[in-house]
Image (cartoon, rainbow, N blue to C red):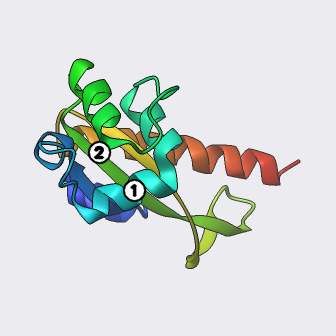
Amino acid sequence: MKLQSQLFEESLRPAIILHLGTMLTDPEAVPEVLEEAFEEDSDVIYEAVGVDSTYAGDDFYIVYDLIDEADKLDYLVKFETPIPTQFFGDGGVGYSWGYYTSKWFYGKTYNECCKKAIKWRRQWIEDQIKENSK
């Protein structure tokens, strides 16, 4: 099955697609979408990228240095998926895109980010089903 079909089947949508290598070339001219992402989710982004953020915050000189030194200048993608609102006896779930959660993924390619998101979403849904069956 093609990756885009898998995303559709898994009810995953990419909300933000960033390429850090092109967006962090000048810490004084950071694109607004990247600035907003770090303002809203900096700790989660650092975790996804695998960089220690103890001293960074959203100072893009420090952000650039940390990410560049760690050679993490590839793709950062925020995926969204609906939160189950109904649970059925056969293990199925019902949901609406009116309630959703999101998670950031880092990868060398966009496809790698998609595969990580699919794996995460499957586990997350399993956990939601288990939690609801208690």
* Residue 55 percent across, percent down from the top left: 48, 27
Q: Is disc 1 surrounded by few (<14), some (14 to 19) or many (20+) residues within 10 Å?
A: some
* Residue 110 percent across, percent down from the top left: 19, 45
Mark nearer the viewer, 1 or 2: 1
Question: Is residue 114 at least partly visible in the picture?
Answer: yes
Which quadrant of the view contains residue 5? bottom left
Q: Is residue 104 above or below residue 79?
A: above
Question: Is residue 1 at least partly visible in the picture?
Answer: no
* Residue 44 percent across, percent down from the top left: 51, 42
Q: Are marks 1 and 2 in contact (CB under 8 Å)?
A: yes
Residue shown at 36% from the left, 38% from the top = 116
* Residue 94 percent across, percent down from the top left: 62, 72
What element does badge 2 sit on? Answer: strand
Q: Which residue is mark 2?
A: 76
Q: Is residue 28 above or below residue 90?
A: above
| Mark 1 vs 2, N-terminal side | 1
Q: CA distance from mark 1 to mark 2?
A: 10 Å
Residue 33 lies left or right of residue 20; in this view the side is: right
Q: Is disc 2 surrounded by few (<14), some (14 to 19) or many (20+) residues within 10 Å?
A: many
Identify which amino acid the numbered label 1 is placed on: Ala
Identify which amino acid the numbered label 2 is placed on: Leu
Q: Which residue is mark 1?
A: 37
Residue shown at 22% from the left, 54% from the top = 30
Which quadrant of the view contains residue 29? bottom left
Q: How many marks?
A: 2
Residue 100 lies left or right of residue 35; in this view the side is: right
Task: Tell which residue pokes out farthest to the top in this image.
Answer: 69
Residue shown at 25% from the left, 56% from the top = 17
Q: Nearer the viewer, residue 37 or 13?
A: 37
